[in-house]
């Protein structure tokens, strides 16, 4: 009988083991709650941030903004005119998407970026979307909240 009680005592968890398990479970619950909070904040920031040009769709606010700028610049965008597109520095790797949207919205002009072909003629006009340029030889034709259209004076 004595040995049966000893075996029974060994198989039952002690109070200290239960306390340790509760402490570990509480620690894990705290970390899970922190991770959920971080994910919720990240989702909120992702929704508030402007999507990159790669993620634009025809009804995107950025496409409407670019269209407003191109509409204002319309009198200068004659068929065959060469236009170099300049974008903000944070989107410089995606300038070709902005160029593609400009070509979609105004197909008569020839749209280029600085990276398309460096040996090629740079363009008669420069469309600086969401920025203003201080390059020598550029004369502003149109200044708009969405950007500026320049003519090369060279």
Image (cartoon, rainbow, N blue to C red):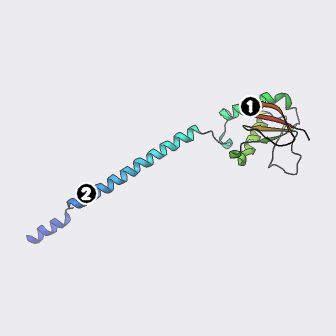
- Badge 2 marks a residue whose secondary structure is helix
Image quarter where the N terminus lies is bottom left
Image quarter where the C terminus lies is top right
- Badge 1 marks a residue whose secondary structure is helix
Count of all numbered marks drawn on residues in the image: 2
Residue extending furthest toward the right: 154
User: Is 91 above or below relative to 67?
Assistant: below
Residue in the picture at 52% in, 39% down: 44
Question: Relative to the observer, which residue lies in front, 6 or 75?
Answer: 75
Crowding near the residue tagged with mark 2, few <14, some 14–19, many ≥20 C-alpha atoms within 10 Å: few
- Spatial distance from mark 2 to mark 1, Cα to Cα? 64 Å
Crowding near the residue tagged with mark 1, few <14, some 14–19, many ≥20 C-alpha atoms within 10 Å: some
Residue matched to label 2: 19
Q: Residue 78, labelled with which disc?
A: none
Q: Position of residue 66 (x, y in %)?
A: 73, 33
Residue in the picture at 78% in, 28% down: 71
Drawn side of residue 21 relative to residue 147, left or right: left
Q: Position of residue 19 (x, y in %)?
A: 25, 57
Quadrant location of residue 49? top right
Residue matched to label 1: 67
Question: Relative to the observer, which residue lies in front, 24 or 12?
Answer: 24
User: Is 20 above or below relative to 106?
Assistant: below
């Amino acid at each position: 009988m004595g040995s049966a009680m000893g075996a029974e005592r060994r198989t039952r968890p002690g109070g200290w083991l239960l306390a340790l398990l509760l402490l570990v479970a509480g620690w894990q619950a705290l970390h899970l709650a922190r991770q959920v909070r971080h994910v919720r904040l990240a989702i909120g920031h992702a929704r508030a941030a402007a999507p990159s040009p790669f993620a634009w769709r025809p009804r995107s606010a950025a496409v409407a903004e670019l269209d407003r700028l191109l509409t204002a610049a319309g009198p200068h965008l004659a068929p065959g005119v060469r236009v170099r597109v300049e974008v903000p520095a944070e989107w410089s790797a995606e300038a070709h998407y902005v160029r593609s949207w400009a070509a979609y919205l105004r197909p008569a002009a020839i749209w280029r970026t600085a990276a398309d072909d460096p040996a090629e003629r740079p363009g008669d006009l420069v469309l600086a979307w969401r920025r203003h340029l201080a390059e020598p030889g550029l004369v502003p034709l149109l200044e708009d909240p969405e950007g500026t259209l320049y003519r090369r004076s060279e």
